Image: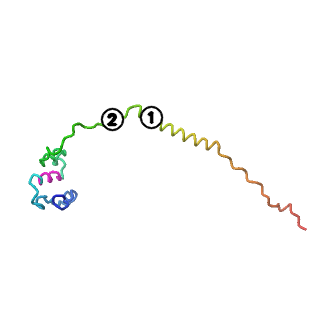
Amino acid sequence: MLLTGQTPVSALKRKIDKARLVEPKDLNNLISDRTNQAILTGMKLDPKKRSHSMREWLDSLGLTGATPQPDSTVVPEPKSNWQEKINWTAIAAIGTFLSGIAALIVIFKQPQPPSPPSLSPNPSSTKTP
């Protein structure tokens, strides 16, 4: 879209509806043959026909020298055994703490006092004149 000003036909329409992908160079004649071919290769429906890496695709554009290679790959350091033990210890401590609170609630929960006796007069105890 940057070079042509138009969004290309989606891969889904190309696959299902057999829509034709318009070459970028047909929309902008200032695009070089090399760039046009690199874009078309990157948009192939069959992944086996596309470039297999960004490096390979940049090579097809002639940009290999313009992008520096990283000196080394950063590999994440695996967690040590003591870090995993600390995690499990913390989980166990929190679980124990919550269980203790639940037990204290049950132990100290006051039973409901019985309802007070009714103070209303008993019909048999009232005398009528």
Residue farthest along the top direction in this orientation? 81
Q: Residue at x 18, y 50 (%)?
A: 46
Q: Is the C-beta separation of discs 1 and 2 under 8 Å?
A: no
Left or right of 109: which side holds 75? left
Distance of label 1 from label 2 (alpha carbons): 17 Å
First of labels 1, 2 by sequence position: 2
Q: Helix, strand or loop at disc 1? A: helix
Q: Quadrant of the N terminus?
A: bottom left
Residue at the spot of label 1: 86
Instruction: Report x, y in % for residue 19.
Output: 17, 61
Task: Please give the residue where the numbered disc 2 appears in the rendered image.
Answer: 77
Q: Residue at x 29, y 36 (%)?
A: 75
Callout 2: few (<14), some (14-19), or many (20+) C-alpha neighbours within 10 Å?
few
Is the residue 68 above or below the residue 123 in the image?
above
Inspect the image, locate mark 1, and give the three-letter code of the amino acid beneath it: Ile
| Quadrant housing residue 73 | top left
* Segment colored magenta: 36-44
- Left of 36 or right of it: where is 98? right
Q: Is 18 on the left or on the right of 90, as rendered?
A: left
* Picture quadrant where residue 8 is located: bottom left
Q: Looking at numbered disc 2 in the image, what kind of residue is underneath it?
A: Glu
The answer to whether 61 is drawn above or below residue 10 in the figure is above
Where residue 86 appears, x then y in whole percent? Answer: 44, 34
Residue 73 included in the magenta stretch of the image: no
Nearer to the camera, 28 or 126: 28
Direction from residue 127 to residue 20 in the image, left or right = left
Check residue 42 for magenta coloring: yes
Query: Residue at the spot x=21%, y=59% of the render?
Result: 13
**Numbered-mark total:** 2
